[in-house]
Amino acid sequence: MRPYAYVRAHDVEGAVATLAEAPNAAFLAGGTNLVDLMKLGVETPDVLVDVRRLTSDRVEDLEDGGLRVGAAVPNSVLAADRKVRTRYPALSQALLVGASGQLRNLATTGGNLLQRTRCVYFYDTTTPCNKREPGSGCSAIEGHNKNHAILGSSEHCVATHPSDMAVAMAALDAFVNVLGPDGERRIPIEDLHRLPGDEPQRDTILEHCELITSVDLPPLRFLSNSKYRKVRERASYAFALVSVAAALDVEDGVVRDIRIALGGVAHKPWRATKAEETLRGEPASEENFRAAAEIELEDAEPLRDNAFKVPLARNVMVRTLLELSEER
Amino acid sequence: MSTTAPGSATGTAIGAPLDRIDGPQKVTGTAPYAYEHHVDNPLYLYPLHSDIARGRVARIDAGEAEALPGVIAVISHHNAPTLADTRDRELAILQSDEISFRGQYIGAVVAETFEVARHAANLVSISYDEDRHDATFTPDRDDLYTPEQLNAGFPTDTEEGDVDGAFSSAAVTMDETYTTPVEHNNPMEPHTSVAVWEAGDLTLYESTQGTHSVRRLVAKLFGLDRERVRVVALHVGGGFGSKGLPHANTVLAVMAAQVVEGRPIKFALTRQQMFSCVGYRTPTVQRIRLGADENGRLTATSHDVVEQTAKIKEFAEQTAYATRTMYATETRRTTHRLAALDVSVPSWMRAPGEAPGMYALESAMDEMAIKCNLDPIEFRIRNEPELDAETGLPYSSRNLVACLREGAERFGWEGRDPTPRARQEGRWLVGTGVASGIYPVFRLPGSKVRISYRGDGRYAMEIGAVDIGTGAWTALTQIAADALGVGVESINLSIGDTDLPSASVAGGSSGITVWGSAIFEAARAFRERHGDDPAAGDTAEAGTPDNPDTENYSMHAFAAYFAEARVNEDTGEVRVPRMTGVFAVGNVINPKMARSQFIGGMTMGLSMALHEESLVDPRFGHVVNHDFAEYHIPTNADVGEMDVTWVDEDDPHVNPMGTKGIGEIGICGSPAAIANAVYHATGIRVRDLPITPDKLIH
């Protein structure tokens, strides 16, 4: 690992100011991904600014009936939170199928959103990777790409976003609160993560010195009828081949409202807006769920090793929505 | 205490469920593994790997690394010690600028801390003259060749009768190809060396399966008298064959110790580095053709294997070996062909040969049973041989049928509807499968035991054997107690050190057979010479005696595996909630430890069936999923109920203990039981391991 300076700021403003001055500095929270990447030489910051104790580690009620999750709330605490479990079960479920018990104890809400891809070529500094070294080329497009994207990729990058939590938050229409040198801004989670385009090195729209301080979950009642289903090659401790977070509001057999997000298929949590639009106002039937899923996946462009993700994503969307409509 | 501890009454140690005698040390973290041996003032080594697969090192610029505080030396072919013997090209590292595979060691940084060494290694700038490499393994290459012999000395090809004729006239035939991927051994403890070179003497604390074999090899490579090399391995955190033959990491550590003479070198591989230079299981492509008559008796069996080796050193896995003896068949052919590539050298991985070979054969037997309209157990029993077809010898004992029947009973096989895709629970398709297992009784040369009476009622029992986590510390103590006719508390066992009498490698499931036989022989010699009332200091030494029965009998352990597989109809996820394994392995020294070996073997079989796959990117020539996030082995949640038992088997021919070796048989056949269960659940026959969701979803 390259030597680096470790700094602890007094408050969030100080942390942001420190990063504003240091172009090769990074925030350190749980460190469960960053430190691994530093050991491998994938990330090489000069300075780590420890923000773990600066942001809130509490889950609090908002006046509008929603919840505010502090950026420092550990994944295990968020998963176990009673309000989260009852009002946003998909989020709790997503957290619990991510990583391992030890990692969830250390990993934070803010850090989880900023996990980097698990593309094997990104992790291997001896192979070209546009995300790690812009312009060097993408090794995955013609290499081993079973775990890679089928939607929204570019000729520069076919990586996927690895977070489970972020997929659930995308389906829940969460907002991410961010502090920068010019103050706070509030970003719909849908806009936080980017598609790779020609800048695959940028995972999110955040500026270098912007710090996630909290995540707001909206007060929509039907989000209590939500679910997260993750498909992986082993029963635990593996990244998703495909995952689905969905929330469903059905009245008299008709879809009143719906949220669907997919994991493991794109460079960002993939909000299935086409499927949602197709289903709103339609009968909640297997046939309609399937048709909507197929519409969502019409644009899929599978690679050599991951054509299976198209039927897989379709099947999991259909099954998850069926379960949500049956459980009501 | 009114009760007697297990194994303390005379003659009762073998077969007693003793706790591990090294258990308290291990759970309190005081059992010294190689890296934990205290040495004064150590230095740390971090290796430099080649980033190309073929060519030459053009230039190594170590200026920046050498300038880093704490860096002691940067070693490369420019300044590495010259080896006395360079014939083994896997081991003769840093002797020239030549690069023969990606990941090859081309140097090392030695520094005051591991962190500085690792950082400095990143600062070494290396340029290459790159040649075109060839790391593409396919069975249709036009340069496949026939090795002279296979691993362990088995013949490359065999042929009995007119297979093609028998196949073309058979009533029922099948012809399918099965493939298995590159797999890496990945013991929990990585390969580790602590090397101390002082005044021409070398002490090596080594994570190895064989102290004496490492000593022989290191002495030869470095031109040292064997007596000047001491190798110590008191506790080893697994090897699965990857620590059976010394690899280049050991050479690199010793070279560094020589360069910085006087200060110890510590070198532990990272998990990622475990995928480059310490062996792996070759990928295999196996075509199996079976022909049978109307009664389901095999008339033709052919098993043709294509696998890979490295250009720099041949390793020819004996993949079709088991097919030569497993079933009766009128005609039989087995062949092995190799593709020599610019890759690192494949080597032993738990049951080399039988593990991939029995996956293919036992999958084929399942397919053939279905074609013959027979229950797969009945089909196997119909083809049970009288004699070992390969040698014409009778089996010293062969209780496969008993294993199949006992397993069927325990697992609840009776009444099984063979129709595929006919059972469902919720979204999960449910199926069951069966497969046979086999593993030979190996007998390696070169083990000796010394027994000395210490005068306090205790006997010192000394042999340089290694316990790689299997329980040898305990099992050898039990054998020694019964061999001398004393309780286990009277035995002071010393193992894991070349200062002790020589021992063969802990490999081929042979340790108990070979070392235990030597213990019995030494005990006999001791009692003959010194009687039952010896004086302090009385001693005797003996080696593993010849066993004339090896000429007269075919010696193999057998097993039967049963598995239930559940496959999710929507997602193709495979779960195995339960497995049964029934073993015919002769006498069991310690049922607790035997159970662990069987469960471990079957779990590795599950791993092979569903998870393990090293993804080689032929454009680069190396394994790209080189960590435990991406190279999957089962988690606890993947391992369901493991029901393990063994049949009574008295084999008077194998050795004085009546044992057959239990370390490897658990992985031979168990993957096929799972593959067969997946077929039964889904109607999809996956002939390409591992069985992952992408192969089951449509």
Image: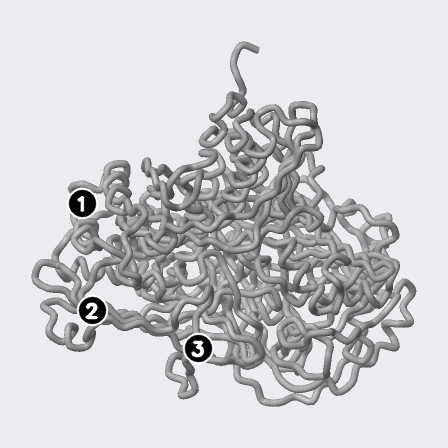
Instruction: Assign the N terminus of chain A to one quadrant of the image.
Output: bottom right
Q: What is the distance, in whole Å, between disc 2 and disc 1 at their CAs?
A: 31 Å
Position in image of residue A156 (x %, y %): 58, 80
**Amino acid type, residue under disc 3 in the picture:** Pro
Is residue A236 visible in this depiction of the protein?
yes
B625 to the left or right of B436? right
Dot placed on the residue nearer the N-terminal end, 2 or 1: 2
Classify mark 2: residues with Cα within 10 Å, few (<14), some (14-19) or many (20+): many
B608 to the left or right of B279? left
- Tag 3 residue: B147
- Tag 1 residue: B416
Is residue A226 visible in this depiction of the protein?
no
Instruction: Assign the C terminus of chain A to one quadrant of the image.
Output: top left
The image quarter containing residue B356 is bottom left
Dot placed on the residue nearer the N-terminal end, 1 or 3: 3
Position in image of residue A304 (x %, y %): 43, 76
- Name the residue: 40% across, 46% down: B654
Is the residue under label 1 in contact with that under label 2 (CB below 8 Å)?
no
Q: Nearer the viewer, residue A304 or B23?
A: B23
Q: Say which of marks 2 and 1 sits in front.
A: 2
The image quarter containing residue A205 is bottom right
Q: Say which of marks 1 and 3 sits in front.
A: 3
Instruction: Label 3, secondary structure: give it.
Output: loop
Position in image of residue B398 (x %, y %): 29, 47
Q: Nearer the viewer, residue A167 or B519?
A: B519
**Amino acid type, residue under disc 1 in the picture:** Arg
Q: Nearer the viewer, residue B385 or B260?
A: B385
